[in-house]
Image (cartoon, rainbow, N blue to C red):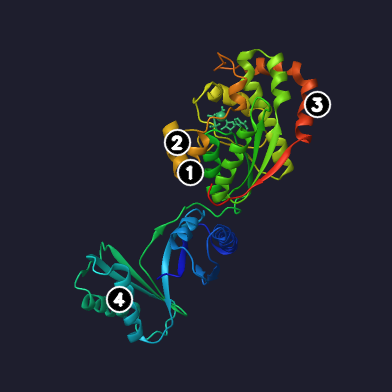
Amino acid sequence: MFTSFLIKYGEIGVKGKNRYRFEDALIQQIKYALKKCEGSFIVSKNSGRIYVEAETEFDFDEAVEHLQRVFGITAICPVVHIKDNGVEDLCGHVENYMRQVYGNEEKTFKVHARRARKNYPLNSQELDAKLGEVILDAFPNMKVDVHNPEVTLNVEIREKIYLYSQVIPGAMGMPVGTGGKAMLLLSGGIDSPVAGYMIAKRGVKIDAVYFHAPPYTSERALEKVVDLAKIVARYAGPVYLHVINFTDIQLYIYENCPHEELTIIMRRYMMRIAETIAKETECLGLVTGESIGQVASQTMSSLLCTNEVCTLPVYRPLIAFDKEDIVTLAKRIDTYETSILPYEDCCTIFVAKHPVTKPNLGIIKKHERHLEEKMDELVRTALETKQLIIAAEEQGI
Ligand code: ATP
Ligand code: MG
């Protein structure tokens, strides 16, 4: 019965000029999300409200599922809109609405009417009372509860009249594009896609970089990362994925550094390269999936060493999360099943049996100094041979 949705969004902090930016970005994201759905839709803004209207046949559940991925939406309300043909006509529509949505279900309810147009013959309280009576008369299974009702029937008198009572939770957060852009270090693991999702939720557009080490890491490992970027793109919009061939850099570190420092030095080069690409692409920060103490390279001492090479802020949204919590979130956003596919990662191939958990920055820097000359050249080549893949949401992945 529904062909329209009223989109509710957080209004705190979105006043004045910011409000337009917020709303326009939200409309753009809604359009992007619905492009993948059956049917065609009009998304419009009308006196501080956003409406989605289906112009054709569409799949209700599919449209809701896609809208539920749009950051910035607090609630999605299926809405019926009718022309104003007087109070008696409205009473008929209300009865019809309640019958179609609730039928014979036993429910407590209240009516909540609002007038944006003060020339309507009844004021809000009179409307509440009148429409409440209509419902009580027509449905013996309905009871009034003004304090804690199971159903709140909202009646909004605007140019048209809107009826809605169902409130489907939205993704919350801020519309992507309102918060600048960040570079996500995206591996094939569980953590980094979740980290990207969390930062995107704050309105930040995400670009990504993946360090690939062929032939030690296979084409399938790269495909897995592309698939993960596509899943993140369902929420964050198209992701520009930069693929860096890291093989020669890793081999050179492997041959020239104490093995227990391998991971830290490798991570420092990853950060340096990611930062170079980030600056070239106007990103305002880096994002990783690190969490304190999860592995040797993520102790406080190790993070200090990795962080030291960066001048841009490094955002680590999972820093205080337990693995179980990350897994729960990964399952909810649908990255988990892809992340656990068993393809090798460059970090797991060149790994020491006993990596340092308390690396000393001074010593690490001393060892890196021996690498410098050759490494400058290897890093330059890696950047010059960088591949760009645009990962956008696809159906059925
Ligand atoms: P993840 O599950 O995200 O792979 P992890 O627990 O395996 O994380 P590490 O392998 O130590 O942890 O990596 C820490 C972070 O470094 C990752 O979350 C990711 O942001 C980044 N990273 C690691 N390997 C790569 C890679 N091959 N390409 C891009 N980024 C990487
Ligand atoms: Mg990993």
Say which residue appears at 50% left-offset and 56% top-offset.
66
What amino acid type should be assigned to the residue bearing mark 1? Asp
Q: Name the secondary structure under disc 3.
A: helix
Q: Residue 129, relative to residue 331: is it above or below?
A: below
Q: How far apart are marks 4 and 3 (CA)?
A: 75 Å
Q: How far apart are marks 2 and 3 (CA)?
A: 39 Å
Q: Which of marks 1 and 3 is nearer the N terminus?
A: 1
Q: Name the secondary structure under disc 2.
A: helix
Task: Name the spot of residue 206 as percent of width and height, x first.
Answer: 61, 45
Left or right: where 299 falls relative to 77:
right
- Residue 358: which quarter of the image? top right
Kindly identify which residue carries mark 3: 377
Left or right: where 179 falls relative to 78:
right
Task: Name the spot of residue 49 as percent of width and height, x first.
Answer: 49, 68
Kindly identify which residue carries mark 1: 334
Q: Distance between the residues labelled 1 and 4?
A: 43 Å
Say which residue appears at 56% left-offset and 23% top-offset.
297
Q: Residue 327 carries which label?
A: 2
Kindly identify which residue carries mark 4: 128
